Amino acid sequence: MNEIRRRTRVVHGYRRAFRMAGKGSAVLLVHGIGDSSDTWAEVMPGLAQRYRVIAPDLLGHGASDKPRADYSIGGYANGMRDLLSVLGIERVTLVGHSLGGAVAMQFAYQFPERTERLVLVGTGGVGRQVTPVLKAATLPGANLVLSALRLPTMRTQIGLAVKVMQLLDTGLGSDAPDLLRVVDALPDATSRNAFIRTLRAVVDWRGQVGTMLDRCYLTQGMPTMLIWGERDQVVPPVHAGIAHVAMPGSRLELFPEAGHFPFRSDPQRFISVLRDFIESTEPAHFSPEEWRSMLRGQSPQLRRAVAARLAATAADGPGDRTDRPGAAELKERETA
């Protein structure tokens, strides 16, 4: 990954950092909250052997500028479009992790003509549930807590707690090193402020603010794959089953021993699964007429079909992993 150097472009007056390597069809890797393009270190070189891979640092993250700016999901989707335009890339396969998955879904929704495929990895934006740690980080005083986490005495205590979780073989224990890496990537007040502004745009004390369930029918005709760690404690695997049923024709890949970062837990399988998905699917092509038709006529029918399918599969298959909370949430959406 060190050989794939960071580059920068100035867009709207702000420096946008990114890594880019390879040739061929374009694959855009979008990281999660508080993270950076470094998170893709173990998969980017392998993917770059076949594809042109672009891994940006989102605004407010990594080596990109951290202004007082728009850190909403829609704002990030616009930023990805503008960076791709500056780089001369018209169409991409989107791969989004966690917050980056929500950004990828928003990008596909706003710019279907520029989206070839959609790959969502432990994505946010499916249901309301999220780890209590992220809920707590939206509360007043979160900046002070994040600052305290970097104190030597606090890091020693956290390290002991992590070892205990790992000895107990908990899901959060498997993700702890990566979560601490995210905390370490917030070295100053500017970084922490950008992190908190981003988080508060998508999460509050009750959970995730918005979901994609009202628009997931639009993935019909869009090759879509969901990748999830079965031990994910940040965005629970229940969301994988909800999204799989709600997105017509989607493919679901579960990583049994992985938590919230399956591409780091098993990078070779991740590369293999992603390559197979890209090679075995045709890129989407939406005309304005097709998009208008879906918006006008198919939403109610598909929502009813999704609700029926989720109820029918609640006792077996993906339903075993999603349980009843998914059915209740989708039923609530359908009633609304």
Image (cartoon, rainbow, N blue to C red):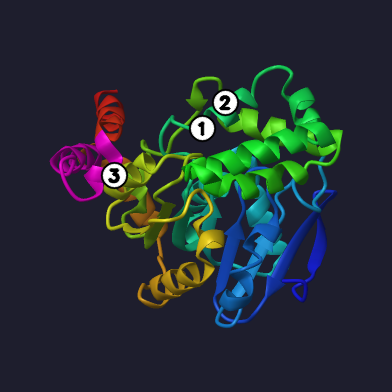
Q: Main secondary structure of the magenta part?
A: helix
Q: Is residue 299 left or right of residue 35?
A: left
For disc 2, the marked residue is 135
**Picture disc at residue 123:** none
Instruction: Kindly check if marks 1 and 3 are in contact, taking CB atoms under 8 A apart as contact.
Output: no
For disc 3, the marked residue is 321
The amino acid type found where label 3 is placed reads: Arg
Q: Is residue 123 above or below residue 190?
A: below
Q: Position of residue 124 (x, y in %)?
A: 49, 41
Q: Is residue 242 left or right of residue 133?
A: left
Q: Which residues are magenta?
A: 302-323
Instruction: Kindly check if marks 1 and 2 are in contact, taking CB atoms under 8 A apart as contact.
Output: yes
The stretch drawn in magenta includes residue 305: yes
Q: Residue at x 36, y 37 (%)?
A: 213
Q: CA distance from mark 1 to mark 3?
A: 17 Å
The stretch drawn in magenta includes residue 238: no
Quadrant, the N terminus: bottom right
Residue at disc 3, secondary structure: helix
User: How many C-alpha atoms fall within 10 Å of the one at disc 1: few (<14), some, or many (≥20)?
Assistant: some
The amino acid type found where label 2 is placed reads: Lys
The amino acid type found where label 1 is placed reads: Thr
For disc 1, the marked residue is 131
In front here: 206 or 202?
206
Q: Is residue 155 left or right of residue 316?
A: right
Whether residue 193 is visible, yes or no, is no
User: How many C-alpha atoms fall within 10 Å of the one at disc 2: few (<14), some, or many (≥20)?
Assistant: some
Whether residue 83 is visible, yes or no, is yes
Q: Position of residue 297 (x, y in %)?
A: 26, 42
